Image: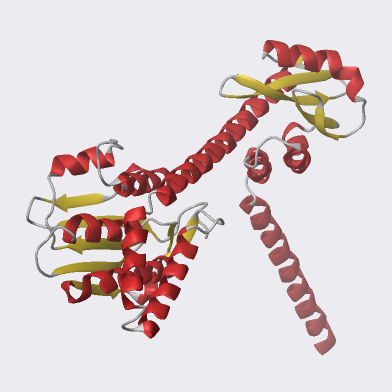
Amino acid sequence: MNGVVTAVAAAIVLLAGVLAARWWLLKRRQSLGSPTDRATYTTLHAASLTAPALRGGLDAESAAHSLPHIRTLLGTPTVAITDTSGPLAWDGPGDPDDVAALMSAALKSGTTQASGQAIVAPLSVDDVVVGSLVVVTDQASAGLARATTEVAQWMSSQLELAELAASRTALMEAELRALRAQISPHFIYNSLGAIASFVRTDPERARLLLLEFADFTRYSFRQHGEFTTLAEELRSIERYLVLEKARFGDRLRVVTRVAPEVLSVKLPFLSVQPLVENAVRHGLEGKAGDGTVTVLALDAGNECVISIEDDGIGTDPETVRVALSGGTSSPSVGLGNVDERMRTVYGNEHGIVVETAPGKGTKVTLRVPKFAPGVEP
């Protein structure tokens, strides 16, 4: 009797296990969604894997990385990407020579071309054909032609983003070169003059100032990287102010307050130092008596808020407007340069804010996101 009870109990446990397993599998299948949901996920996943390669521009490497994912999107035996000269990468059976005429027609007309077993859709950047997407299959259909055209248009949008990124990089580099060119001979002349004045009276101080000058110029003219950390920028500012204090003596006071948690924030190279130079050169240099420059870098949630304030002579707000608009009549090229680079990197809402009036000093504020795509030192 006990054996029967045990067997029944075991059967019940086994049945319960089977039912539980079937329930789990059913829930698992439902959690994966409908066939339409799964197809949508597969498509979006393939597109997300393709995009990073295309963002690098159209070349053999990006084409080779993209093709497996393009094949997943279109589900065809053969896909290829070309530039205007010929195939950059070919994945699958077939001979490029067999579709050469079709490729030529698509590149020339800027429209999708199809034959019995091949479809070629143009790739364009700013309405200029730069290459093509080639599909070879057993039987080309109208639906596949539409799909190929849509994928080619999506690829073109990614290539346009790559072109935009390249243009932005070129603009940033040009603006940085302009800023370096105006790291003023005025400052260099005054710094060397101040160092020379200590050569006989205080040789050790002259030596230390010369080392600070060398480090400052080395940082300012370095050739690698569009971005830096706030810590590095502040070290450069400290060197700059040491050199200016050698010239101004006790007339120049400096107040610095920096939150430790923002020291690692990345920001455009030479985006704070020119603002400090403006405070000294245009704010305090023409002021009688003492002057103070205050540099603050504070934590504000997702942003770092940096301000440079002086109690100098101030200026007419219209002069600032001209400087920020890039006007050549402005004595402060750095102000407009920093504003333009901040807007280019982070968007128009992150341009610098200037508060000033004649005789009231000047305060410049910039808000730097702690995290932004593509911002790496």
Q: Where is residue 266 in the image (x, y as percent from the top left)?
A: 45, 61
Pick the residue in front: 42 or 254: 254
Q: Is residue 60 above or below residue 314?
A: above
The one nearer the camera, 147 or 17, is 147
Residue 122: percent from left, percent from top: 69, 21
Q: Can residue 272 be seen in this view?
A: no
The quadrant in which residue 121 appears is top right
Q: Residue at x 29, y 36 (%)?
A: 328
Query: In terms of image quadrants, where is residue 28?
Result: bottom right
Coloring applied to the structure: secondary structure
Which residue is pictured at 36% across the width and 43% down the height?
A: 340
Return the x and y of residue 169 as percentages of the image width and height: 52, 43
In this picture, residue 227 sits left or right of residue 287:
right
Instruction: Spot the residue most to the front.
Output: 200
- Front position in the image: 151 or 130: 130
For the point 27% across and 41% down, the residue is 324
Relative placement, left or right, of 183 versus 114 is: left
Q: Which of 226 and 92 is in front in this view?
A: 226
Q: In which quarter of the image is residue 276?
A: bottom left
Can residue 2 be spotted in the picture? yes
What residue occupies the far bottom of the structure in this picture? 2
Check the picture and name the quadrant holding the N terminus.
Answer: bottom right
- Give percent across and percent down for residue 133: 74, 26
